[in-house]
Image (tube, grey):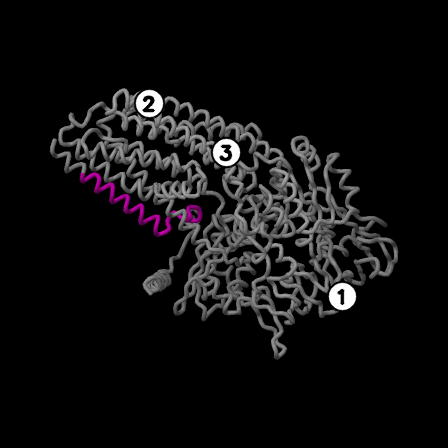
Amino acid sequence: MNTDTRTSCHHCGTPCDSTTFTRDGHLFCCQGCMTIYDLFRTSGNEEFYEGKAINTELDAYTFLDNYEIARKFINFSSEGVNQVSLSLPAVHCSSCVYVLENLPRVHEGIIRLSLDFGEKTASIYYDPQLISLRQLASLLDSIGYAPGFDLQDRQEEKNKMRTLALQIGIAGFCFGNIMLLSFPSYLGMNAADLDTFGAFFGYLMLLLSLPVMFYSGRDYLVSAMKSIISGHIHIDVPIALGMITLFLRSAWEIVSASGEGYLDSLSGLVFFLLLGRWFQEKAYRHLSFERDYTSYFPLAVLRKAGNGEWVSEAVQDVRVDQVLMIRNNEILPADATLLSAEAMIDYSFVTGEDQLINRTKGDFLYAGGRQIGPSIEVRVNKPCSQSYLTQLWNNPAFSQQNDTYRHLMINQVSRYFTWIILLIAVVAGIYWSWNDSSRMWEVISAVLIVACPCALALATPFTNGNTLRIFGRNHFYLRNADTAETLGSVDFVVLDKTGTLTSTRHAEITYQGEPMSNLEKQLTAAMVKHSTHPVSRKVYEFLQGHDHLSTASFTEHAGKGIEGHCGEHFIRLGSSRWIGRDEHSEGRVILEINGKIKGYFELKNALRPGLQQTLTRLASSFPIIVLSGDSERERDWLSALLPPDTEMHFNMSPFDKLNFINELQASGKKLMMVGDGLNDAGALRQSDAGIAVTEDISQFSPASDGILEGNQLINLPVFLDFSKTSQKIILASFVLSFLYNAVGISLAVGGLLTPVIAAILMPVSSISVVAFTTATGNYLAKKRKL
Amino acid sequence: MKILFLLISISILVAGGFLALFIWAVRSGQFDDTKTPSFRMLFESKSEKEQEKKINNDEENHTRG
């Protein structure tokens, strides 16, 4: 989506498409930018913050009063200081950093707040005697940064990256020094010329190569050993073989004073390999691809205690027959029976059906629904872990390791590669044992050294890593580099309907009936702005620019409609049954002003803008299948919009979707599933490449292999096409590195591989392959306007 | 030429010193977040040294305990 100047933030220029933050007619992307704007206008900072000390305790964070839950977030506490790490998904520009890091000046209880911009997390030191965790969360929420509480351990990830950085640093250090020490031999001097220096240099190099071999290169050795034990030969085996041969032969040459070894090649090899790994791993650490229902469900709910008081209870501890209170916009964590008179439940996330469902007293409610409207009371029927929804997570699809990666190109190639190399080494060894048996071991080790598939191993991470980066620039975030390769080999594209092809945000609202006067538009706008009901929000957007009046009274009747006074006018907006007209008008919202019906609003499902052409284009290269939780009545209008012969399945429950994917896979096809929401979670997980579509990447998305921003869905064919192209780039670089290997091996077999040639050949082959994949990838992406 | 033994040993030691600094920097988390400090340096700050001190002390106690 292109953003013009109208929709970019007045302060920082970040594109923004909501109109939430305006001041003096300027649009801001966030509260932070608006605050800065205000700061610039008022002279001193102190005045601004005055009167801003916020002591509210928002209901949404009641669960933090439960000590057992709060304790999980507190990383350490000592007298007067607690430290928590919270994720703040709203953080997105430099102003956010400023506003948040100056919070200690707003509230004396906050001692220090430091933000990690990339990961959108804040580490906060606070004094629990002055501010409770709940107050802290409420304070952050009230200034526009609603904190997210997930129990994910980021520390482990951080430590992994730190170790990798250390390994690279140490390998680089040793590589540089070893190169320096082996410089005399590049100039053609041998150990004899160098007198006593030869041994000195040699042992120094050997010393420097120890950390390279056993610290930096440790992972390759371990992984190769595991691979041999499990019987699946992959790329790490020939690498480790090459490393060990290089090290042993060099050590032998140095100790026996017969040469200076190949330690420069060894350390260079490890250094470049680690760089490739860094490139592959340094992706989007702030995006979460591993979420399950626990991060979707609330952490705690309000439970009625014996004395009739409401207490906060951790969701796992909810027992059968307990009475819970579910407030507006909260999610029901367990299957339950409704005790209140009426409830409006939004199941769109579970079933995919985009409709509010009206339930009355005594009805059974499934977990996962969101209550819209006033608080309700329910009695629990099943504990949280056994509810209808959570059963999905007990499906084997969630416990099994995704083993599609075994089929990756590089691992298929390296299986043959390893055996061929060993064969060549043996044949060359036999030949030399007849010809000149003293050189047999020299030749065998030379073959193993030069065949070390360094360039081969680098081709995949660099190409896929580059693809990942290019996609990320276009708001398509893949879980890891290997997914880029899986994407390039799919046979089928399975799409979810609700939320993916259509989205409530893009549903068209139309008004039918007597044309509204300007005043009537203003009256209606004044009404709907108080309601959080999705239809009201739509009507409000429809009447944008007419919000000038304020209401005298306003009442919302859950499941029926809204009514209220504005000046001397009385406005009612709601379902036809409630308004009192018995026309056949399911799904319409009737507008009544002063007892007279003006007309009705109607929500029409619509495909996302531009999607129709996209689907046509997609259908030309892949069979498309559409799965929907909606009923058959959707078929007609949908089939008119989709390419002809599109397979469509309706009334699919989350389990049906999962089974459908399973059956397709059983026929040996690779497929990509594109979906949103919890109802697709199983299918996304089971498919070879599951892509979650989301409007806002910081919000919840189910476990998946990739996250795609909703408005980028139209680019899906381009993404798939490019994935295919990058597979070709990988193949091409395989060919290139095989050529290098062919040259190297012929030299080695002929007994001509000197340390100088090895020292030149190995880095040159690695660097040229990396340069080739990156440059070609970028060029082709540019050509496709990615 | 014998002086080379000494010179090379010294140069390796000096370089090793820098390597040690690098290891310390990574371990202390200076490479964990490379983005935020670039914003932070632009803000005017009234440093609150006392509080910093308090936190540092607490952290030390924490790691020791």
Label located before the other in sequence (3 or 1)? 1
Residue A360's label in the rendered image is 1
Camera-nearest label, 2 or 1: 2
How far from the left and from the top, in percent, is residue B40?
43, 50
- Tell if the residue under mark 2 belongs to the same chain as the one under mark 1: yes
Judging from the image, mark 3 belongs to the subunit labelled A
| Amino acid on which the number 3 mark rests in the picture | Met
Check disc 1 and give the amino acid type: Thr
- At label 2, the amino acid type is Val
Question: What's drawn in magenta, residue-wise?
Answer: B9-37
Give the residue at the far right of this rendering: A582
Q: Element at badge 1?
A: strand
CA gap, disc 2 and disc 1: 83 Å
Q: Is residue A670 magenta?
A: no
Q: Secondary structure at mark 3?
A: helix
Determine the main secondary structure of the stretch shown in magenta: helix
The residue that mark 3 highlights is A409
- Name the chain under label 2: A
Task: Name the quadrant of the C terminus of chain A.
Answer: top right
